[in-house]
Amino acid sequence: MIIAALVLTTHHTHQIDVISAYIRKFIEPKVVGLGWESHRARYRETKRSNPKAGGLPLGTSKPLAVYYALLTISIYLVTFVTGLYHHRFALIFISILAVCSLACSYDLYKQKTKGWRINWDVLDNQ
């Protein structure tokens, strides 16, 4: 269940980033006074270049990734508290699920899978 929620969160976070990039690239230049996506992009760049700058975390994906990683670790630890580790199949199954979930959390945190970065300049030339 947690992996399904994590996959959906990754997908929807990616879609939000794509929509934000589209608004920033194509809509904001044509609408006077509209600039919240450009402002957020500048803010994230400032935070990346100067990690000591105060303010909220970068975007939505990193806090969600940390949340899912902590949730996965807590569920994995319940395996040992409840004694499921005595059953070899249960331990192997839960370990595989935990590794998959942590891998998805890492991807959500680092945004490494295909499609996170869109080159809009290539699309302009088509």
Image: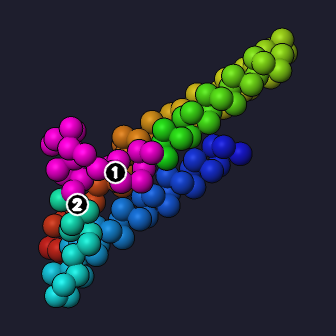
Quadrant where the C terminus sits is bottom left
- Please tell me which residue is depicted at 75% across the width and 17% down the height of the picture: 80
Q: Would residue 43 appear left or right of 62 to someone viewing this image?
A: left
**Tag nearer the camera, 1 or 2:** 1
Q: Position of residue 98 (x, y in %)?
A: 63, 29
> Crowdedness of circle 1 by 10 Å Cα count: few (<14), some, many (20+)?
few
Total numbered circles: 2
Amino acid type at circle 2 is: Ala
Measure how far apart labels 1 and 2 are at the Cα level: 13 Å
Which label was assigned to residue 91?
Answer: none
Q: Which residue is mark 1?
A: 56
Q: Position of residue 46 (x, y in %)?
A: 17, 50
Residue 100 visible: no
- Asked if the stretch drawn in magenta spans residue 70, the answer is no
Image height check: is 56 above or below 91? below
Amino acid type at circle 1 is: Leu
Image height check: is 94 above or below 116? above
Q: Would residue 59 appear left or right of 80 to someone viewing this image?
A: left
User: Dot 1 lies on which element?
Assistant: loop
Is the C-beta separation of discs 1 and 2 under 8 Å?
no
User: Dot 2 lies on which element?
Assistant: helix
- Please tell me which residue is depicted at 26% across the width and 62% down the height of the picture: 40
What residue range appears in magenta? 43-63
- Please tell me which residue is depicted at 35% across the width and 65% down the height of the picture: 18
Q: Residue furthest bottom?
A: 31
N-terminal-most mark, 1 or 2: 2
- Please tell me which residue is depicted at 43% across the width and 64% down the height of the picture: 15
Q: Position of residue 72 (x, y in %)?
A: 62, 33
Image height check: is 63 above or below 79? below
Quadrant where the N terminus sits is top right
Q: Which residue is mark 2?
A: 41
